[in-house]
Amino acid sequence: MGRKIIAVVVGYIAMALLLFITFTVLYLILGTEGSFKPGSFEVSTIWVICSIIVSFGAAPAFLIYKTHLYSYEIFGVLIASSLVLAGGFRLARFNVQLVGFDKNYFSGLPIPISAITISSFILSYYEMPQGFSPPFSEMVLPLVIILSLIMVSKIKYDTIPRPTKEEFKKNPFLFLIILFGAIAAILTSGKAIFFIFVLFILFGIFRYIFTLFVKRT
């Protein structure tokens, strides 16, 4: 009986994480930070920023704390909070620097990408009741710290194109990659999502390093 109850709970957690990831991807495609007014501090803009921080910063931070970081006690609280603080800093910087914003790139990892990475990691590797098993349990701490640092960095990341004919003509190869990624996510019940976004993050890092190397030579 106890195992059946645990199975039901795990099923609800998995469904919640999949819905959260789906919502976040739709947010990236249909409604992004680009809707902010340059340097605006109107109540509506501040409300949007706060809602983004709560949805894509506080929610993943709470999830990763409750699934693993709680074992580090106060240190775990601080590490989990770094996702919220880094995401808030990045959004504040984005709002101030919005004038001249290049819609092809984001400066620093967008907070929704961080949220998807954390959520898909939990979806793929967290098991009830034992939690994360090695080596994934050792990956949690560096994963959270690295995501926080990349969010406040100046590494450029491509924006996700909107599903329009004009965008498809501009980036047909990118749309194919997104399509194959979506198919892989469906076929693996969401477990491929983590690897897809890790590759996206690593691509931005390697491109940044390569650009610096080219400029110096």
Image (spheres, rainbow, N blue to C red):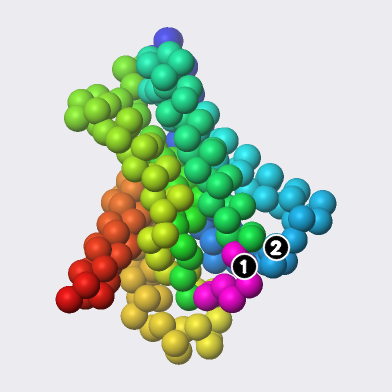
Judge whether residue 101 is colored magenta. yes
Identified at 47% across, 25% down, the residue is: 78
Dot 2 amino acid type = Gly
Which numbered circle lies on residue 98?
1
Crowd rating for badge 1 (residues with CA inside 10 Å; few <14, some 14–19, many 20+):
some
Tags 1 and 2 touching, CB below 8 Å: yes
Q: Quadrant of residue 70?
A: top left
User: Viewer-proximal residue, 45 or 30?
Assistant: 45
Q: Which residues are magenta?
A: 97-103
Return the x and y of residue 4 as percentages of the image width and height: 42, 17
Q: Magenta: predominant secondary structure element?
A: loop
* C-alpha gap between disc 1 and disc 2: 7 Å
User: Viewer-proximal residue, 135 or 214?
Assistant: 214
Image height check: is 156 above or below 174? above
Q: Quadrant of the C terminus?
A: bottom left
Counting the numbered discs, the total is 2
Return the x and y of residue 187 as percentages of the image width and height: 32, 54
Return the x and y of residue 130 as percentages of the image width and height: 32, 17
Crowd rating for badge 2 (residues with CA inside 10 Å; few <14, some 14–19, many 20+):
some
Image height check: is 57 above or below 46? above
Dot 1 amino acid type = Leu
Which numbered circle lies on residue 39?
2
Return the x and y of residue 123 as percentages of the image width and height: 39, 38
Judge whether residue 63 is colored magenta. no
Does any portion of residue 7 appear in the rendered image? no
Identified at 41% across, 83% down, the residue is: 171
